[in-house]
Image: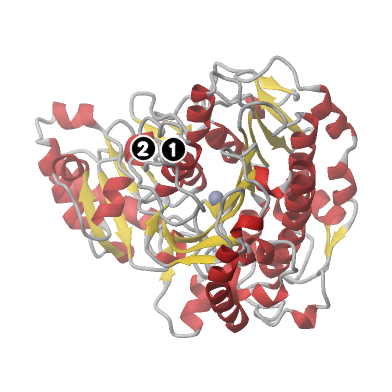
Amino acid sequence: MKSLALHLLFLAVTCSVGYAQKKNETEVPDKPKLVLGIVVDQMRYDFLTRYWDKYGDDGFKKLVHQCVLCRQLYYNYVPTYTGPGHASIYTGTSPAMHGIVGNHWYVKENRSTSYCTQDDKTESIGTTSPAGKQSPRNLFSSTITDQLQLTNLGDSKVIGIALKDRGAILPAGNMADAAYWYDDACRCWISSSFYMKELPEWVKRFNDKKYPDQYLSGEWNTLYPIQQYTESLQDDNPYETIVKGKTSPTFPYNLKEIAQAYQTSSILRSTPFGNSLTTLFAIDAVISEKMGKGKSTDMLCVSFSSTDYVGHSFGPYSVESEDCYLRLDRDLATMITVIEKYLGKENVLFFLTADHGVSDVPAHLKDIKIPAGYINEAVLMNKAKSFCAQHFGDSLVLNYINNQFYLDDTKINALKQDRCELQKKLALHLIGTESVAYAYTYCEMLQQSYVHFPAEYIQHGFHPLRSGDVMLCFKPNYMEFEQRGTTHGEPFSYDAHVPLIWYGWKVKSGNVIDQRYEITDIAVTLANMLQVMEPTGATGKVIKGIIKQEKSV
Ligand code: ZN
Ligand code: ZN
């Protein structure tokens, strides 16, 4: 941590020297050949600084050495989940406009829950499982990737890649050439008929190499001797999930035994090797698709999902999480080195951010006297239902998801109740139950304009066509979860504060930006850099001071 601060100071001092030498630099093209967007799933800001001394020279450190680092980038809405996160990064707006109000949300008309990229009109490509029946059709806004395609009349090549479907599909946008995600059933990369009729030959060849089988027949042990993981708690502690087939949450993890115990190969996702597989596939995509070699700027959107799975199981102070980031650092180094060699550094614009942060394990915080705790959603549900039954003659609650209650409007109308009044009464009643600190209603979200926390965050996450009737905000570090492991989704800084790094092409070397920016500013900044129109729903602003010469047109 200390050495990172010193390093950034050094960069600030030497920045002017860099400017003096500008004339000797390689000619930088007007537009990058390739934009590589990297999203690290669940990378809270402090994962950059806490493990800094352990990172190698060519991964995170290389990005920070020669980049513009935005140290104050925040999500500005709830819920801070993967679907909304990826959508907001690439649309330059919040769920209030792009409509991805959760990974799942409740649909009253169907009396069922809908998944953010679910599309039953499509077919799986590359697998017999239904895992490919997906598309970005739930997005209400275009993405920066769409705008690039639109400007270049479809001549740009745009591809999204992630183990998680939503991490690949939402960034790649509506006009994407392809999005690929991982199917546990076939242990292979798959896609949807939304993009293609069959997998390209290079994807088939990659799948035929059966890397997942190799990973799953081995074990996960620490990259360095375990006593060197001094940034984390001791390996055996009461805050980490004990996986099936083991008696303690400790290294080494025999992946063959664990996969057998769970009777699924999905365990690969919860190891750093899921990120390694993503890296190999992303590099293959660039080279096989000749990305960056055409006339127009291409864009590859890569999301590293394994950090999230590992983080949920073991928490931010685990040796497992630390090892996952140290290994990701190596994977990043490989990817950056290969792509720079292939296209030249001046031709590639990289940016790296995260789709949300993560809470510390509440049980850990409680043990060290920091306020935290657990919520029982069944208690909340009973309280809401019994209040409605007592006061309005019917329990009225259809569903509880994303900290929101969805009520039965048909019954409310039949009971001749005023919908807004009823919502308000229920909201007020719930404050104080199970650590509910604030409660707002659908009608308030439509009628008011909030500028204070957390109401503003709830409003940015509210869409009238998809959100519930009563929205709750709990006290910080309270969650419905097991006592071991952790999650995210709240408006607080631990879930909202993420890194943002710009690197390559015309990016200034070694600048630090400490002005507060929001996640919705990334796509708008990209639009400005690439001189394309902003995504259709964009509400963000341009982050100033990233590239060397601003366009004069
Ligand atoms: Zn995520
Ligand atoms: Zn997660």
Look at the numbered discs 1 and 2 and tell me whether their residues touch, using CB distance below 8 Å: yes
Residue 406: quadrant of the picture: top left
Question: Picture coordinates of residue 29 (x, y %)?
Answer: 61, 40
- Density class for disc 2 (Cα within 10 Å; few <14, some 14-19, many ≥20) is many
All told, the count of numbered labels is 2
Give the residue drawn at x 70%, y 54%: 270
For this rendering, which residue is in front, 254 or 355? 355
Residue 130 visible to the viewer: no
Secondary structure under the numbered disc 1 in the rendered image: helix
Question: Picture coordinates of residue 517 (x, y %)?
Answer: 38, 57
Whether residue 413 is situated above or below residue 337 in the rendered picture = above
Left/right of residue 460 with respect to residue 512 in the rendered view = left
Which amino acid is tagged 1? Thr
Give the residue drawn at x 65%, y 36%: 33
For this rendering, which residue is in front, 261 or 265? 265
Residue ID for mark 2: 538
Whether residue 405 is situated above or below residue 325 in the rendered picture = above
Residue 373: quadrant of the picture: bottom left
Which amino acid is tagged 2? Ala
Left/right of residue 507 with respect to residue 243 in the rendered view = left
Question: Picture coordinates of residue 245 (x, y %)?
Answer: 79, 60
Q: CA distance from mark 1 to mark 2?
A: 6 Å
Give the residue drawn at x 65%, y 73%: 51
Left/right of residue 121 with respect to residue 201 in the rendered view = left
Give the residue drawn at x 76%, y 55%: 331
The tag earlier along the polypeptide, 1 or 2, is 1
Residue ID for mark 1: 91
